[in-house]
Amino acid sequence: MANIGYIRVSTTEQTPALQADALSAAGVTKLYSDLGVSGSLASRPQLDAMLENVRDGDVVVVWKLDRLGRNTRHTLTLLALLADRGVGFRSLTEGLDSTGSMGRAMITVVRAFAELERGTIRERTVAGLAAARARGRVGGRPRALSPAKIEFAKSLRLKGLGAQAIAAELGVSRASVYRAFAD
């Protein structure tokens, strides 16, 4: 069993010293550091390397929970991945420790609230789309050609103009012209 640390700082101007000192004091024996890497990036080289190398019984230690994932969903996905592989997790600032029963319970509660949030957002989105459809609104990008312009495009086609020339005349892409003819 090893305490494995992960550090991330977003810009090269930031220093990882605070995180490194805290992790060292917490007994971390191996350290992975992404320096100057935004948390919004899905792929972070050192995080990916750490995830490849952790083994059953290891404990991943971070200074703060937001150093691990890009957002709540990503963080929870990583926590679930670690748990499934038998890897513990500790966040020093928040005091989360999945190696104990209370820490596992707290992470379960956090995951449950995140799932509730996702479900609520999904329900609101579906209800909003249904209400918009009931009012006659359709989602998506507006069509490039109005019905009048489609008729004009068809008349140009009957005169022998090609799709590229019609598109140039109407100020739209050739794909928009083909789409109009297909309808």
Image (cartoon, rainbow, N blue to C red):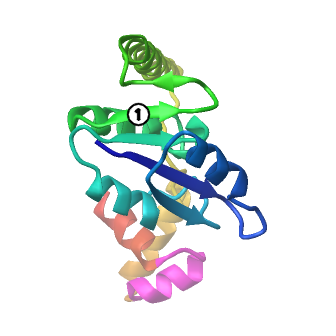
Residue 157: % across, % down: 39, 80
Residue flagged by tag 1: what amino acid is it?
Phe
Task: Name the quarter where the N terminus is drawn.
Answer: top left
Residue 96 against residue 176 in the figure, above or below: above
- Residue 71, compared with residue 111, is above or below; it is below
The percent coordinates of residue 159 (x first, y second) are: 41, 85
Q: Position of residue 154 (x, y in %)?
A: 41, 71
Residue range of the region highlighted in magenta in the rendering: 161-173
Q: Quadrant of residue 108?
A: top left
Q: Residue at x 37, y 79 (%)?
A: 158
Task: Judge left or right: residue 82 versus residue 21.
Answer: left
Q: Secondary structure at mark 1?
A: strand
Q: Is residue 132 visible?
A: yes
Viewer-closest of 126 and 147 = 126
> Can residue 43 be seen from the camera position used here?
no
Horizontal arrangement in the rendering, residue 163 relative to residue 41 (left or right): left
Q: Which residue has dot 1 on it?
A: 89
State which quarter of the image contains the C terminus.
bottom left
* Viewer-side residue, 62 vs 173: 62
Compare residues 114 and 139 and report the one nearer the observer.
114
Q: Please tell me whether residue 33 belongs to the stretch shown in magenta.
A: no
